Image (spheres, rainbow, N blue to C red):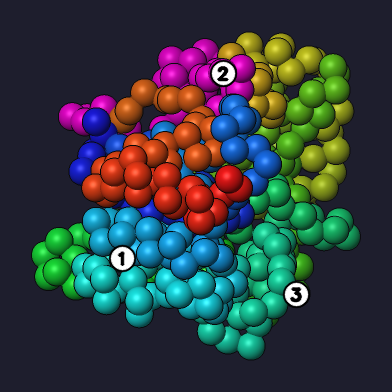
């Protein structure tokens, strides 16, 4: 069930963005087989491991030759593979692209890294914020004189990494279906986070010197494009960028007749700071809920700043069934939505190795062969 029903993905389980990509594809109906390392928690429930949902789990100790052979047997029936190791690791294990494509010429071999498969930094250790810093994306994340920070994992690992890998895998599968030829997808977070800047670039003036001379966009934060603190310590967010939305906002705030807040002056940087201070004082006169009652659902481009549990209870999010609780863990449901094909129901996260026997049986191995694999340690500690 799902729009990707019939697609088989082998995921060499690693850190963050690789498992997120696998979850996304599983959410859309792909059969994602998660190849996991031996660990002490084999067979233990782990409902918090949301990026493992919807997958089937097999444990293989890739240091054992029997496990490598089994992995390649899995590859032989797969449409795509996901791996997120440093460059060279898969090759050292004997399951690099050349070996896997020899076994499955139509395979789409998806590689997820921070710096990419080549370049001076390719083998250097780093994390989300490092990739964003080098790509230029982090520069725009925070106001001047404040240390630039972005939400952990969202921009680099997920948006710049996992989502670009998913697009690459799906594009590669489409080509392989038409032409029978697989290929390697080099998805780097530094590439993806740079590519995400193109929409922003399209809005910037042609004169880049002017942009950077004024530090980040919003150096004098516009009074109609910022967050405001309410009387209860909660926050609301405004982004009334277009003239008609700005006019509506001013009217609803009771500032429509004040010439200082006139639409003709809104783009004058000289007024942003003093008008922002006045609006900050205004927003502190009511609670977040009171501002929601006044502004939410209007054309003022307004929203309350919510935590994830609060978002799950918001009427709009509930109407769209954006969040659900599965096995006690609050998590977002599948996205995007399809008009004809429903996405699979959210399933419990499998225990590590929960499907080892099932997957090996589907490869044609009998009970005796599976027992032999266990004796060699290929399936983890005996």
SS at badge 1: strand
Q: Residue at x 18, y 29 (%)?
A: 340
Give the quadrant of residue 28: top left
Give the labeled residue for mark 2. 327
Q: Which stretch did the figure color magenta?
A: 314-342
Give the quadrant of residue 165: bottom left
Location of residue 121 in the rendering, given as x and y in whole percent from the top left corner = 65, 82
SS at badge 2: loop
Q: Residue at x 45, y 60 (%)?
A: 67
**Residue 146 visible, this angle:** yes
Image check: 63 left or right of 29?
right
Magenta highlight on residue 2:
no
Give the quadrant of residue 176: bottom left
Q: Earlier in the sequence, mark 2 or mark 1?
A: 1
Q: Earlier in the sequence, mark 3 or mark 1?
A: 1
Q: Residue at x 82, y 47 (%)?
A: 273
Query: Which numbered dot is residue 213?
Result: 3
Badge 2 local density, few (<14 within 10 Å), some, or many (20+)?
few
Residue furthest left in the image: 178
Distance of label 2 from label 1 (alpha carbons) = 33 Å
Screen quadrant of the N terminus: top left
Q: Is residue 373 above or below residue 181?
A: above
Q: Is residue 126 above or below residue 3?
A: below
Give the labeled residue for mark 1. 108
């Amino acid at each position: 069930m799902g729009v990707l029903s019939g697609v088989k993905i082998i995921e060499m389980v690693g850190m963050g963005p690789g498992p997120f990509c696998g979850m996304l594809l599983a959410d859309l109906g792909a059969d994602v087989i998660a190849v996991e390392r031996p660990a002490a928690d084999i067979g233990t429930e782990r409902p918090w491991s949301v990026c493992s949902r919807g997958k089937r789990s097999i444990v293989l100790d890739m240091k054992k030759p029997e496990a490598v052979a089994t992995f390649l047997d899995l590859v032989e029936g797969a449409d795509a593979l996901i791996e997120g190791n440093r460059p060279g690791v898969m090759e050292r294990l004997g399951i690099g692209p050349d070996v896997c494509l020899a076994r499955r010429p139509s395979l789409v071999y998806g590689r997820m890294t921070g710096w990419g498969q080549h370049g001076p930094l390719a083998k250097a250790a780093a994390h989300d914020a490092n990739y964003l810093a080098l790509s230029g994306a982090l520069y725009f994340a925070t106001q001047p004189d404040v240390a630039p920070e972005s939400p952990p994992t969202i921009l680099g690992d997920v948006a710049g990494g996992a989502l670009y890998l998913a697009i690459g895998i799906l594009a590669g599968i489409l080509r392989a279906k038409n032409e029978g030829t697989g290929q390697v997808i080099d998805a780097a977070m530094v590439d993806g986070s740079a590519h995400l800047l193109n929409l922003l670039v399209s809005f910037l003036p042609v004169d880049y010197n002017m942009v950077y001379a004024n530090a980040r966009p919003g150096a004098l934060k516009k009074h109609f494009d910022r967050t405001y603190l309410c009387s209860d310590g909660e926050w609301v967010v405004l982004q009334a960028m277009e003239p008609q939305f700005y006019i509506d906002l001013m009217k609803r705030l009771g500032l429509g007749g004040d010439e200082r807040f006139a639409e003709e002056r809104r783009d004058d940087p000289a007024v942003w700071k003093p008008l922002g201070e006045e609006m900050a004082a205004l927003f502190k006169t009511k609670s977040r809920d009171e501002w929601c009652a006044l502004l939410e659902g209007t054309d003022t481009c307004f929203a309350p700043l919510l935590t994830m549990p609060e978002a799950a209870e918001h009427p709009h999010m509930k109407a769209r069934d954006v969040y659900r609780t599965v096995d006690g863990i609050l998590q977002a449901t599948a996205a995007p939505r399809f008009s004809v094909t429903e996405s699979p129901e959210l399933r419990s996260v499998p225990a590590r190795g929960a499907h080892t026997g099932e997957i090996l049986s589907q490869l044609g191995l009998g009970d005796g062969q599976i027992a032999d694999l266990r004796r060699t340690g290929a399936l983890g500690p005996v």
